[in-house]
């Protein structure tokens, strides 16, 4: 009797013909499983499979870790800082940390050059009894911060790629016993991260003074 060979179902992140669905938390998770060579995929993080439970444990911490890694353009926001009534010796002003802020990059006064990658006024992030706070001598300060972006639709494609490889790297130990897999995943993750960082850096351009301008003007 001839046997009918069943075709393996594609992961839920794929449509017919291999077309990728709109990126989502589940599609990123299933890409991580595919990177590991897994053949079982998930449809929800709430299902009872070992894969779903492991991904549910790791997804948000890995996402926040990767977001905090650098000042990604898509995750960087400029926001006025709400004042705290508390006082801290040595500093003139105390501000509340904006909701969802993962890292504070810079603090500026109103009208300051908030698009700069560096500079700004001196500041410090502290934990007070009322919560985490930013202290600075700048009045009416504006903060440049990395925010906790949760919607995958806001992630650039190359960031999603790096996130899926990083997630695969984190979950490979609890899901597989392949000893050499981690090194392979780490190499792929570092390459994906490099590509994402390069693409992100290309979205910023600042004008630099031409060398010798002051000297030439002085001679004129």
Image (cartoon, rainbow, N blue to C red):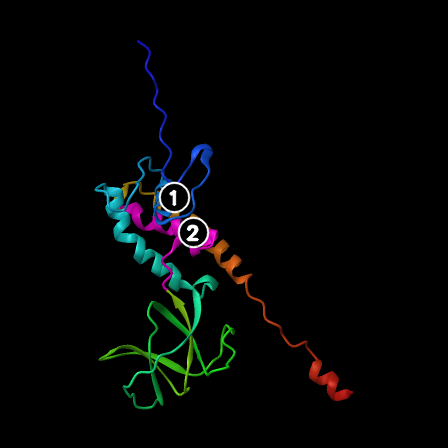
**159 left or right, relative to 168:** right
Toward the viewer: 183 or 143?
143
Question: Residue 159, percent across and down?
Answer: 44, 54
Q: Nearer the viewer, residue 68 or 191?
A: 68
| Stretch in magenta | 148-173
- Residue displayed at 77% across by 87% down: 219
Rendered view: 102 above or below 8? below
Q: Position of residue 163 (x, y in %)?
A: 39, 52
Q: Residue at x 47, y 80 (%)?
A: 120
Looking at the image, residue 70 sits to the left or right of residue 5; the answer is right
Mark on residue 31?
A: 1
What secondary structure prevails in the magenta region?
helix
214 sits to left or right of 205: right
Residue designated by label 2 = 160
Mark 1 nearby-residue class (10 Å; few <14, some 14–19, many ≥20): many
Secondary structure found at label 1: helix
Secondary structure of the residue carrying tag 2 is: helix
The image position of residue 211, as x and y in percent, is: 68, 77
Residue 49: x and y in percent read: 23, 41
- Disc 1 from disc 2: Cα separation: 10 Å
């Amino acid at each position: 009797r001839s046997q009918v060979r069943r075709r393996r179902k594609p992961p839920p992140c794929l449509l017919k013909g291999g077309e990728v669905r709109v990126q989502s938390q589940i599609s990123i998770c299933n890409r991580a499983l595919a990177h590991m060579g897994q053949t079982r995929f998930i449809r929800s993080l709430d299902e009872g499979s070992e894969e779903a439970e492991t991904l549910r444990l790791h997804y948000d911490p890995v996402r926040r870790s990767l977001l905090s890694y650098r000042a990604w353009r898509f995750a960087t926001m400029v926001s006025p800082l709400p004042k705290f009534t508390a006082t801290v010796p040595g500093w003139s002003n105390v501000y509340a940390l904006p909701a969802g802020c993962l890292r504070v990059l810079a603090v500026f006064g109103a009208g300051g050059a908030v698009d700069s990658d560096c500079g700004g006024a001196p500041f410090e992030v502290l934990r007070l009894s009322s919560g985490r706070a930013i202290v600075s001598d700048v009045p009416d300060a504006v903060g440049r911060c990395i925010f906790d972006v949760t919607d995958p639709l806001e992630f650039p494609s190359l960031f999603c790629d790096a996130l899926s490889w990083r997630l695969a790297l984190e979950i490979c130990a609890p899901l597989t016993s392949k000893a050499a897999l981690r090194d392979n995943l780490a190499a792929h993750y570092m390459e994906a991260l490099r590509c994402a960082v390069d693409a992100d850096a290309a979205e910023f351009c600042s004008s630099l003074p031409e060398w010798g301008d002051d000297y030439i003007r002085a001679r004129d």
